[in-house]
Image (cartoon, grey):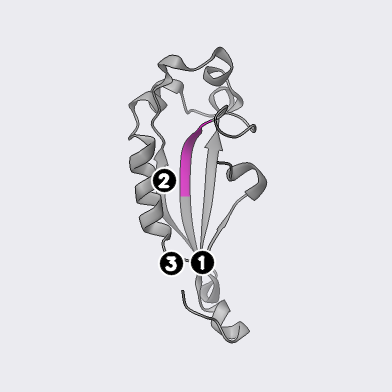
Amino acid sequence: MNKLSKLEDFCKTEVYVVDTETTGLNGSPWDKVVDIAICRVVLGEERVDEVYSSVVGHDTSQWSYEMKHSWIFGNTDLTPEAVGRAPPEKDIALEVSRILSGKNTTSFNFSFDFFA
């Protein structure tokens, strides 16, 4: 981790912003992360770059009616079928960890996006 000694040093850095979509707001084990995206904000340049985006795969065959009909599936083009075909959750977690390791990171809508 690098130390930022002055405000102007911080303003030249990048911040990675994570956004997730879930099957609900109760957290694990009741709800699942089904989509994740990461963008990089280059503060000194006022630039935003897309870094990563993926549907997160799960075995949806055992999901409850509520999970299969959660808000995310009724209000976006994401479907339980797409989640069932997506790369496995563990593979996505490894890739996201690789991308964010050692980076300045935050989340969009933190209270909803980060649950274990």
How many marks do you count on the picture? 3
Residue type, numbered disc 3: Gly
Look at the picture and state if 115 lies above or below 39.
above
Residue type, numbered disc 1: Asn
The residue segment tinted magenta is 32-37
- Whole-percent x, y for residue 34 in the image: 47, 33
Please tell me in which quadrant of the rendered image residue 101 appears.
bottom left
* Residue identifier under label 2: 53
Residue type, numbered disc 2: Ser
Q: Is residue 65 left or right of residue 50?
A: right
Which residue is nearer to you in this view: 27 or 73? 27
Look at the picture and state if 67 lies above or below 46.
above
Q: Residue at x 52, y 80 (%)?
A: 3
Which residue is nearer to you in this view: 109 or 5? 5
Q: Residue at x 57, y 78 (%)?
A: 11
Of tags 3 and 2, the one toward the viewer is 3
* Residue identifier under label 3: 102
* Residue identifier under label 1: 104
Of tags 2 and 1, the one toward the viewer is 1
Overall secondary structure of the magenta section = strand
Q: CA distance from mark 3 to mark 2?
A: 19 Å
Q: CA distance from mark 2 to mark 1?
A: 18 Å
Task: Say which mark, if any, is on residue 35.
Answer: none
- Whole-percent x, y for residue 62 in the image: 44, 15
Please tell me in which quadrant of the rendered image residue 49 appears.
bottom left
34 is within the stretch colored magenta: yes
Instruction: Look at the numbered disc 3 and give the secondary structure of its residue.
Output: loop
Q: Residue at x 43, y 59 (%)?
A: 100
Identify the mark nearer the N-term, 2 or 1.
2
Instruction: Look at the numbered disc 1 and give the secondary structure of its residue.
Output: loop
